Amino acid sequence: MEKVLKNLEPKNVFKHFETLTNIPRESGNEKAVSDYIVKFSKDLGLDVIQEPSLNVIIKKPATPGYEDKKTVIIQGHMDMVCVKDDDLEFDFQKDPIPLVIDGDWIKTKGTTLGGDNGIAVAMAMAILEDKSIKHPEIKVLLTVGEETGMDGVLSLNPDNISGDILINLDSEEEGILLASCAGGCNNIITLDLEKREPKKDTAYKIVLKGLLGGHSGVEINKRRANAITTLARVLNDLKGEVEFELSEIFGGDKFNAIPKRAEATLVLNGKDVNTMNKKINDFQKLLKTEYETSDPNLTIELNEVNCPETVYKEEIKESIIKILCLIPDAVQTMSDSIEGLVESSNNLGVLKEEDEKLIFLNAVRSSVTSLKDNINERIQIICDLVNADMTIESDYPSWPFKPESETRDLMKKVYKRLFNKPLKVDAIHAGLECGFLIEKIGDIDMVSLGPDLFDVHTPNEKLSISSTKRTYDFLIEVLKEI
């Protein structure tokens, strides 16, 4: 197979990154990539631990003269969010990611790229492999299940790793050094479904599509439409003038990706079809005005389909629409301390039917624990009103900001020297593994950095080639200076 990235610099980084794009590594399916990294490390003669969860920990001794320096942990995660264009035939379980070079960008042909966080794994592998780099003792920690609830770091055995400094490589903007992140949890609503035969005779499928979607932490402030909650607005507006029954409703791909598509099947009387068409066309114009900048390609498609055998009971239909219209959606509060930082949010990422139940998967995030709790309490109130159940999973802590950091100070000096501009220290609304790592490893000096990586968790994901080189050069220089 032709190597698409073979001529890019730094060669070792992109060599490993391209290899990773040929190995399945969706969250929950990391065995192949974990085994590959273990073999790679053993072939280099390095000490390696593969935990039962498939986390991998590799130790590289200090180079001569650096034996008494602080131990550095380089950390990232193996898994990726797997999302593709709706009309693309692609199997993330076996098909290699279709890489494309477009100027300074590495892109794909309609799938997520996996730069989040494959570029961290590739950088770590390049450092482990390179014998010319001067550095203190390095421990590489590569976790699994980060995208679906921090499962890998939750299962991490603290006896397997220790260090003085941790450099997380899961950031997505060059020139910004992260020193704090939000905590969060997965909030799951379950509604029991009751069905009956339809009383009406004509069925239509409504498809809301063409949205950009995005990372529910990084892009949540861009006011992109949530396909699921927006479709609920359409249904709520429609039921004011058209009597319809609801046969199914679903949308989204991942709880931590803003949904870019949602569908519902309606059953109605034939005489109401024209009214339905007009209402939906009018509402589409309204939505296009609301989202003309953030989602200019928003489209509502209406297609006649065969009449289904069952529909939801009327009270269930009403409950579904109420949940979707009332649920906290997108940004809830902004930080008073850091300008432009989202403080709390919720993303309803997936709506699906399983075992006669409708499942609503939410990603709640907040840098303030009480605000996270408040969002969950509000969702619980909605559930109480419609007789639904709510559970919370994968509750992960925030990473609090530390006023003093020798590592941050060193990095700012190195960055200024290399690039003649300041390194910005910031916080992020997305969740990083640093909060749990404090609990596992101790309150050591931690930072997070990475190259420019845009539109993650969407098929438009792209990684900057030049930014990757600068970030890697910066990382190598920091290891030398430590």
Image: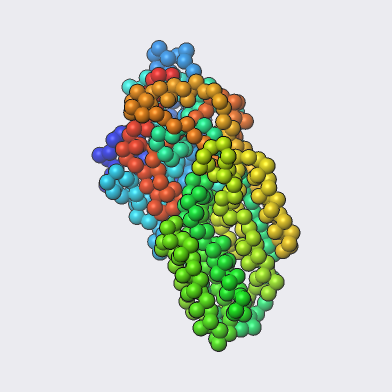
* Image spot of residue 473 (x, y percent): 34, 29
Q: In this view, does 195 lie to the left or right of 413?
A: right
Question: Residue 112, can we see it?
Answer: yes
Rendered view: 329 above or below 169: below
- Kindly identify the residue that appears in the image at 55 percent across and 86 percent down: 270
Nearer to the camera, 336 or 156: 336
Q: Is residue 419 above or below residue 303?
A: above
- Residue at 51 percent of width and 83 percent of height: 274
Residue 95 falls left or right of residue 101: right
Q: Which residue lies furthest to the left in this view?
A: 7
Vertical arrangement, residue 52 with respect to residue 415, above or below? below
Residue at x 59%, y 50% (from the top left corner): 332
Residue 36 can be seen, yes or no:
no
Residue 339 left/right relative to 380: left
Residue 49 against residue 196 in the figure, above or below: above
Q: Quadrant of the C terminus?
A: top left
Point out residue 167 in the picture as x, y percentages from the top left corner.
48, 29
Q: Where is residue 366 in the image (x, y as percent from the top left)?
A: 60, 43
Looking at this view, name the residue that lies furthest to the bottom. Answer: 271
Report x, y in % for residue 59. 47, 25
Closest to the observer, 157 or 357 = 357
